[in-house]
Image (cartoon, rainbow, N blue to C red):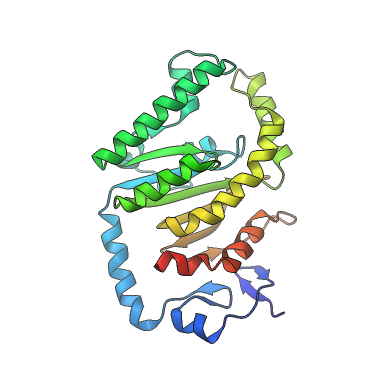
Amino acid sequence: MPRHAVGNVQLGVPRPSREQGRRGLLCGGVHLLPPKEAAGAHRARRVLMDRPRYILFAGVNGAGKSTLFKSGLWDRTSVSEAMPRVNSDEILASHGWEWEDRAAQLQAGREALALVRSCLDARTSFNQESTLTGHSIMKTIASARQRGFRVVLYYVGVGDPEIANRRIERRVEFGGHGVDPETVRRRARASLDNLVKAVPLCDEVFLFDNTYLLKPVARIACGDLVRYELENAGVSWPDEVMRRLIAADAWAGWQD
């Protein structure tokens, strides 16, 4: 099986068929648009910039979503910082509720969902944090896309869910909220599964690895794999995601 290079990573994926090349799918592991469609794609990107934005920070508990939000590694501007922010953990803390209180957790989740619906109905740009597990968040992404939002996903992953569990333990020691370790392990797989499903629904996707140090790994813009570079030896999750996207022909799904 031929191996194709993407950035500094070799992907062992089948060579694209002639039909895939004609449709502008994968060529050498990188999605390319046919020349006739390139100009139209450029115009489409300009239109996207004028739409309300739905910015999603996703990843399993303890991966570093809030760390990324507070960093300068994303498109952080005064406008984006002023957006309504949906984070059930922050809602919980704002009420002074205890994170161990299950009833309080459920109420915070209901308030978060109500805020999401309000922003979607009003076509107001907003950002949200999510583990990207379950059906609700996938419905939100699909709804935002259907309502004309520009959907931008920032995903933070780690090489092993136990890394996330250790970070959560330290967070609890400093008074932060905890999460059951087994829940984190279960969500780690479910989150990656939904990531593969979410990519075709997004206008732009940024992947970050936070196994050792938070750093950008890949960028997918309007179906084009713009960048893919993995310098952390032994971290396999981004490569797995790319392989699954290729196998699912997710790039073609964006064009549809």
Q: What is the x, y in percent for residue 47?
A: 26, 61
Along the line of sight, which residue is nearer the eye, 67 or 48? 48
Along the line of sight, which residue is nearer the eye, 125 or 68? 125
Q: What is the x, y in percent for residue 56?
A: 44, 44
The residue located at (64%, 76%) in the rendering is: 4
The residue located at (50%, 84%) in the rendering is: 19
Q: What is the x, y in percent for residue 55?
A: 40, 45
Which corner quadrant of the image does residue 236 belong to? bottom right
Image check: 189 left or right of 64? right
Q: What is the x, y in percent for residue 44?
A: 30, 66
Extreme residue in the bottom direction:
18
Image quarter where the N terminus lies is: bottom right
Image quarter where the C terminus lies is: bottom left
Q: Is 216 rendered above or below residue 30?
A: above
Q: Is 150 rendered above or below residue 60?
A: below
Which corner quadrant of the image does residue 29 belong to? bottom right
Q: How many marks?
A: 0
The residue located at (53%, 73%) in the rendering is: 30
Q: Is residue 82 visible?
A: no
Q: Is 9 rendered above or below residue 94?
A: below
